[in-house]
Image (tube, rainbow, N blue to C red):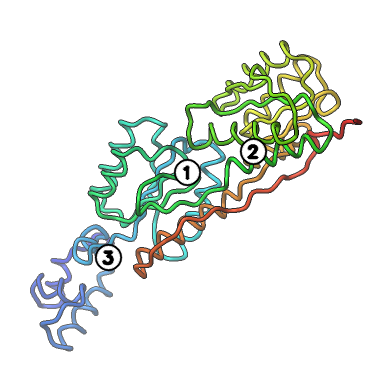
Amino acid sequence: MSMSSTIKDVAKHAGVSVATVSRVLNNLPGYSEETKRKVEQAVKELGYQPNAIARGLVNKRTQTIGVLFPSVSSSFSSEILHGIEDVAQNHNYSIIVCNTAEDGKRTMKYLQVLREKRVDGIIFSSGVLEPEYYEAVQAMDVPLVLVATQSEFDGAPYVKVDDRKAAYDAACYLIRRGHREIAMIGGGESDLIAGRPRYEGFRQALRDHGLPLREDHVLDGGFTFEGGCRAAERLLTAAPEVTAVFAAGDEMAIAVISMAAKLGIAVPGRLSVIGYDNLKLAEMSNPPLTTVAQPLQEMGRLASEKLIAMLDNGETAFSEIVPHRVIERQTVKQRSL
């Protein structure tokens, strides 16, 4: 029999009404053991697969989770997604991934799509959880977990590293290796999630070590390779005294290395570089990039576990700050003091 047998075919085959088949499939009362056996036999013989959405309408669950990323193509998002999917698969949930491209209209449109698909819960990654997004999710009445971002809203537990502390540690790492003229290329002050806290951590580290902070040594690379290249070119041509750069994202760090190569500046001979994230990219760069790691897959796993615990056991989920660490490779060298 074809996979496309309908509930009508099952009813006919078992010699009962469609309503009875539906009751048996949804474990509702009102039929004999004999009838139940007949229906189950018919389902088996016809290879009938109840439609997941139709099933979901009855038990109000579709075993799907919506995941929103500002940029799905980035290796950052794909690492987090790995972790989310691992856990989801083990608990028989499937994932619908939405690429919001940091665009509010698109985010609202996707939330509407997820509502129509009756997802059981939502994981929101990276961007700012705007009030209108939060309200839309509240209206859907499904649980929400944030990953690699946080918000002030109730009932939106998050999983992330302490960005400020991670940036602080990256700067301290450079200072401990004898660097005094240190620059930073970040993601922009207006980005309150991954932008500003990393600048704050960087500035704090310099202050705590009594180092001068020159604002022309703090640039915005917009978290992209292209933006990183533009910022690095400005910095390296205008500030030859800089001996080390903290880039608040690995793509921007690799942009610094590549711009240094163009300008004939040896890394780490004349310029040390430390990145942020520990993307796969970091091992592929030349030389391999020293960076502050976020445990991205683990963060995805935790977010997924929290959401599914809320769904399956009605548990309250709590926010979690996960540990970061410096991964030493070959782009930072000790300066003799």
- Return the residue found at the far right: 336
Q: Are marks 1 and 2 in contact (CB under 8 Å)?
A: no
Between label 1 and label 2, give the one nearer the viewer: 2
Please give the residue where the numbered disc 2 appears in the rendered image: 167
Q: Which mark is residue 49?
A: 3
The residue drawn where x is 39% and y is 60% is: 93
Q: Nearer the viewer, residue 228 or 64?
A: 228
Q: Which mark is residue 149?
A: 1
The quarter holding residue 223 reads top right
Q: Nearer the viewer, mark 1 or mark 3?
A: 1
- 34 sits to left or right of 123: left
Of the two numbered discs 1 and 2 on the same chain, state the one appearing first in sequence: 1
Q: Is residue 243 left or right of residue 68?
A: right
Say what amino acid the circle numbered 2 marks.
Ala
Q: Amino acid at mark 3?
A: Gln
Q: Position of residue 43 (x, y in %)?
A: 24, 73
Q: Residue 302, image x and y in percent?
A: 50, 58
Badge 1: how crowded within 10 Å, few (<14), some, or many (20+)? many
The percent coordinates of residue 239 (x first, y second) are 74, 14
Secondary structure under the numbered disc 2 in the rendered image: helix
Mark nearer the N terminus (1 vs 3)? 3
Separation of marks 1 and 2 at Cα, in angstroms? 16 Å
Q: Is residue 233 left or right of residue 288?
A: left
Name which residue lies at 71% across and 31% down: 206
